[in-house]
Amino acid sequence: MSDSTVKFNLNGHDHDDVFEAPLSLAAHANIPSISTYHDLYEESIKNPKIFWSKVAAHLHFETPSENGLEWNFDKRKGEVFVNFMRGARTNLSYNCLDRIIQKGHGQKIAYKWEGNCEHDDFEITYQELHEKVVAFAKVLRSRGVRKGDVVAIYMPMIIELPVAMLACSRIGAIHSVIFAGFSSDSLAKRIVVAGCKVLVTVDGFFRGNKFIALKGLAEEAVRLAGVDGHPIDAVVWLEHLKRAKVPAGAKVSDVTLDAGALTWDAAVKEAASLEDVIEWVESEDPLFILYTSGSTGTPKGIVHTTSGYMVYAYETMRNSFDVHAETDVYWCMADCGWITGHTYGVYGPLLNGVTSVIFEGVPSYPQSNRIWAIVEKYGVTKLYTSPTAVRSLMAFSTDLVTQHDRSTLQVIGTVGEPINPAAWKWLYNVAGDGKCAIIDTYWQTETGGHIIAPLPGATATKPGSATLPCVGVVPQLVDNDGAVLEGPNEGNLVLAQPWPGMMRTVWGDHTRYVNTYFSSFPGLYSTGDGARRDEDGYYWITGRSDDLMNVSGHLLSTAEIESALTAHELVVEAAVVAAPHDIKGQTPYCFVTLGKQTQLDNKIIAELQQIVRTKIGAIAMPAATDIQLTPTLPKTRSGKITRRILRKIAEGDQGAHLGDLSTLVDESVIKTLWAGRFRLY
Ligand code: PRX
């Protein structure tokens, strides 16, 4: 827990705002009424073994198992662990592809790919996707990748990204997808920590009309990992630029691959004659690692294992999006570099045999109507987006939305951050024409899938609330001393029982897993979020209670940004806090002290921005106006920086009560900080 006590936002909700589940959906929903949900929920909690075995029966297990969930959440009673279907053997790639094909759906479209530029698209069937996955699985095996080896994937949203993920799971390798917006330093760290054998990447790509020469970043990361004593065995290069449409006005630099570089196509040809091996892995064999920010600064490699993740991805996808594979055209806008892309862009949709859209580009290119143009083009029925995307679109004329036919839309989901009621209502009224279910889905990289979310055909929704727990999930609220709070209340959100899809460990650091998630409130999984439960049992997420900030739905560590800033030779000390932002939700606000230097000129500001960009990535980069010079930071007598005060100053609310200042070494610093905040020097 940070130095602050948890704060809860009591505002932003209106008791009268209740939206019943659309009748058109309820009429043929998988879960058609709230009483059906309550029955299922009760069964899932009272008899999880039977409940989850019924879900698992929809999927293929080469070797079955009678075991259900087994766990210990209480470190005082021994090792903390979670197992699901221990002893069973299965394969996720097989379940996503071969199983669907065997059911006679090989010719069904798995993905409709929409490129960064308009009119650059193709479709791929389950059968064709299977062929690509088998071919790339052979490539990985030909490069010595075996069960349990880790493969790094650093790619934009092109079809080869899910192909590489599915190829890993086919041969029992563990994938570690690194968002292509991350820097070479971030990629190198992740390669080193997981000891990745192979890196799969691309020469370059376009985001809007911006050209990204990924080659240079990937090569630099490989070099850095080598210097650190972790050379990569092979790099597979997908030559995306050969086929990508060049946006008008884009400035393209040369990214010719080295003569000896191993290209995707050449590697596929070379490995074509090898055997297709499906590795039947054990339930608890790791499936993937995905890094998320940690409050101490070093990212945590969240580990998900096979059967539990698979069963949970399948079930939550089916329920939350009320999947009807025959008719749905589903579009998850999240990048595969994040958990949403893993669970609801790849595994969840494929396990359910759904047709999905993958979009390589950005919602604002070539114009801010792109999302709705895509919805119209493909007849999207279910759309999964983020509050940040919604807020940025709300700023434009509604014509950009209404000029497109959206009559196919039935469900619009959001994820990643709290959705403010205004954005929720815009989705409902404008984007959804008042006829769609709006589902605010709450979950984390760690939870594998949704844990609190409405059901489109059953749950009455309230703008700003993620509503009720998913089947199998037992949320509780506890106060800062760990006492369980009953009824309508506010507190720290914890989970009292495991569900199959939850994380199993932090890669290479089980102690960190226990300390981060099971130590604040012994015997309970701590989400690190605060929440309020209303009189109907609905949950309202109020935000992080630790030193993580949520920028456009991406968790960032204040400590990690601080350590990047202090790497600048002039910076003596830095403190970073979250400041509110109209579109991104939050944004990093940085206080820096410089040695002898008393001026923060534009050159230093640009260097500080760049250092954050290089060490973490563009998403963590503060705006120039959000870097403030201060001669000193407010500290307690024991030397702790009082972030509570810095947060208030970053928020810019001079009328705010700063709380008890008596523990500060020097109270006069506050005046200086305010002066700096408003550039009064
Ligand atoms: O603070 C919560 C916020 O995002 C955190 C998880 O971030 P990450 O692991 O990156 O996963 C994001 C995608 C699942 C949570 O601890 N968060 C996520 N969804 C919501 C949310 N906050 C409020 N409402 C949500 N629907």
Image: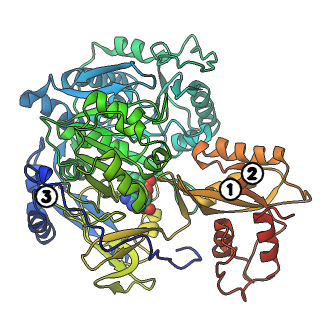
- Specify the amino acid type for callout 3: Trp
Q: Are marks 2 and 1 in contact (CB under 8 Å)?
A: yes
The residue identified by callout 3 is 52
The answer to whether residue 149 is visible is no
Q: In the structure shown, which secondary structural element does the residue marked by tag 2 occupy? A: loop
Q: Are marks 3 and 1 in contact (CB under 8 Å)?
A: no
The answer to whether residue 559 is visible is yes
Q: How many marks?
A: 3
User: CB at mark 3 closer than 8 A to ligand 1?
Assistant: no
Which residue is painted at 25% across and 75% down in the image? 537
- Specify the amino acid type for callout 2: Ala
Nearest to N terminus: mark 3 or mark 2 = 3
The residue identified by callout 2 is 567
Q: Residues within 10 Å of mark 3 (few under 14, many from 20)?
A: many
Quadrant where ligand 1 appears: bottom left
Q: In the structure shown, which secondary structural element does the residue marked by tag 1 occupy? A: helix
Q: CA distance from mark 3 to mark 1?
A: 44 Å
Which residue is painted at 45% across and 14% down in the image? 243
The residue identified by callout 1 is 563
Q: Quadrant of the C terminus?
A: bottom right
Residue closest to the far bottom: 662
Describe residue 35's horizontal placement relative to residue 412 as left or right: left
Q: Residues within 10 Å of mark 2 (few under 14, many from 20)?
A: some
State the residue in front, 331 or 443.
331
- Specify the amino acid type for callout 1: Ser
State the residue in front, 81 or 487.
487
- Kindly identify which numbered label has been placed on residue 629: none
Nearest to N terminus: mark 3 or mark 1 = 3
